Image: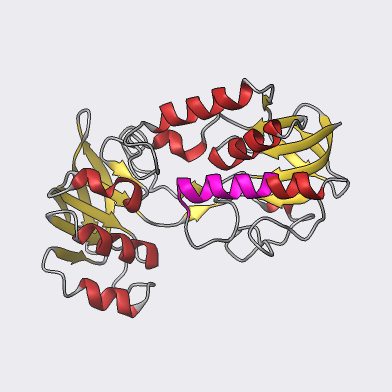
Amino acid sequence: MYDIIIVGAGPAGLTSALYAARANKKVLVFEAKAYGGQILNASKIENYPGIESISGFEYATILYNQVTKLGVKVKIETVNRILPDKTVITSKNEYQAKSIIIATGAQNRKLNIKNEQEFIGKGVSYCATCDGNFYKNKIVAVNGGGNTALEDALYLSGIAKKVYLIHRRQEFRGETTYLNELKTKENVTLILDSTITCLNGQDYLESITIQDKNQSSQELKIDGLFIAIGQEPNNQIFSNIVDIDDKGYIISEDGVHTKTKGIYVAGDTRVKNLRQLTTAVSDGSIAATMAIKEMN
């Protein structure tokens, strides 16, 4: 029997573990792949208060070591199901807890084209607010047609020398106000009815290949590509204990409480307006504090 079981060893999950361990609770963390979550892909973190600059890997490792030195166990096991009585069924065993915190995050939807994985952190990013400042006075492209893509292009227009906004359709799904504002920016060019087919470069991204609806291709030289085509949470396995919205995110009453007593949510996996490192660790600390406070 554990006091708190945490599903996910990203910043939200590990912060929950840190707070719970410091409250002298018996804590177990499950992670399907590797500790750190999406932050591992960040070549540099420079918008976290109190830390001038740090790599995503270094930050995740420091947090992981901080947590495990307090006696927290982190098991590499895939959680397959959670029962209302707080039984956690994994790929290897069954575990029991008094409280559970779901912090499984969300994966950025990828283009799934050549060299995309290789260039993550080397010219390819999924977060303009995280990495945009690294491209000051450089040439960048944003791929997507929703609000995130439009907002990213607007944000980058104040940093980069040139911004290309590439969308596979003629019409955008995002809000008209964002689009109208973008059209006033002299350094923003819209490339419509086009898809990115290849990322080119040696050690770093140097250019992208674009194909239009007529199957005509062109090469565009850029320094950075921001992919903004959505995220994919994986929460269907929790649908018996939490409410999930139409995009797959967990609905919480006040940020951390779910519909099932004793089961909490933290980080990018929940419905929220801002998905950043700062909001993930905030969620983690609040979820752990509430779990401790309300524990039977």
Closest to the observer, 169 or 54: 54
Q: In the rendering, at what x and y percent does residue 98 appear? A: 84, 41
The number of callouts visible is 0
Q: Which residue is drawn at 33% across and 39% down?
A: 116
Q: Which residue is drawn at 20% across and 51% down?
A: 140
Above-or-below relation of 211 to 52: below
Q: In the rendering, at what x and y percent does residue 26 appear? A: 78, 30
Q: Can residue 255 be seen in this view?
A: yes
Image quadrant where residue 100 sits:
top right
Magenta stretch: helix, strand or loop mostly: helix
Above-or-below relation of 273 to 27: below
Closest to the observer, 168 or 4: 4
In which quadrant will I find the N terminus? top right
Q: Residue at x 68, y 25 (%)?
A: 72
Is residue 81 shown left or right of residue 62?
Answer: right
Q: Residue at x 22, y 28 (%)?
A: 203
Is residue 222 shown left or right of residue 14?
Answer: left
In reply to whether residue 277 is colored magenta, the answer given is yes
In reply to whether residue 128 is colored magenta, the answer given is no
Closest to the observer, 105 or 92: 105
Q: In the rendering, at what x and y percent does residue 73 appear? A: 69, 24
Q: Is residue 146 visible?
A: no
Magenta stretch bounds = 275-288
Closest to the observer, 103 or 163: 103
Q: Which colour scheme is used?
A: secondary structure
Q: In the rendering, at what x and y percent does residue 43 appear? A: 33, 34
